[in-house]
Amino acid sequence: MQLQPRSKPAAAIPAAYPDAAPPTAPLFTVEQFAARQPAFTAAALRNMIFKADTRLGSKGKIAGNGLKECGAIVRVGRKVLIDEGRFLEWIRTQSAKGNP
């Protein structure tokens, strides 16, 4: 009996899960992202993450800033991770809209 060579695991995963999203940029914690991108402090990132969700204000609902919808924030339990590529793309779209 002759053994067939095994396929590479990286090639087998897309074949097994054709609807899966392609891998994106690495994920970073708030502190790691702030160290990697010095334009953003950890406090500023936490503020943006807080404002990503729709919240209730004194005058009713306040819409989120879109950071969550674009997929830049990944929550695993209590841990919050930032997808660098999607976050920077979101920043570019904010500039294009002319938001303050």
Image (tube, rainbow, N blue to C red):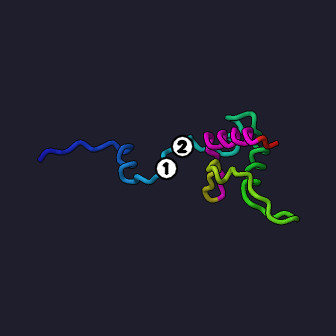
Instruction: Tell me where residue 62 appears, x and y as whole percent.
Output: 79, 60
Toward the viewer: 96 or 5?
A: 96
Three-letter code, disc 1: Ala
Main secondary-structure element of the magenta-colored stretch: helix
The residue at 66%/39% (across/down) is 88
Q: Is residue 95 left or right of residue 73?
A: right
The answer to whether residue 42 is magenta is no
Q: Nearer the viewer, residue 72 or 5?
A: 72
> In which quadrant of the rendered view does residue 90 lie?
top right
Q: Position of residue 91 (x, y in %)?
A: 70, 40
Callout 1: SS: loop
Q: At label 2, which amino acid type do we have?
A: Thr
State the residue lying farthest toward the front.
97
Which residue is disc 2 drawn over? 24
Q: Position of residue 56 (x, y in %)?
A: 80, 64
Give yes or no for residue 79 being in the magenta stretch.
yes
Disc sitting over residue 70 in the figure: none
Q: Are marks 2 and 1 in contact (CB under 8 Å)?
A: yes
Residue found farthest to the left:
1
Q: Position of residue 76 (x, y in %)?
A: 60, 56
Is residue 9 shown left or right of residue 68? left
Residue stretch rendered in magenta on the structure = 78-97
- Locate the C terminus by quadrant: top right
Marks 2/1: CA–CA distance: 8 Å
Q: Which residue is tagged 1?
A: 21
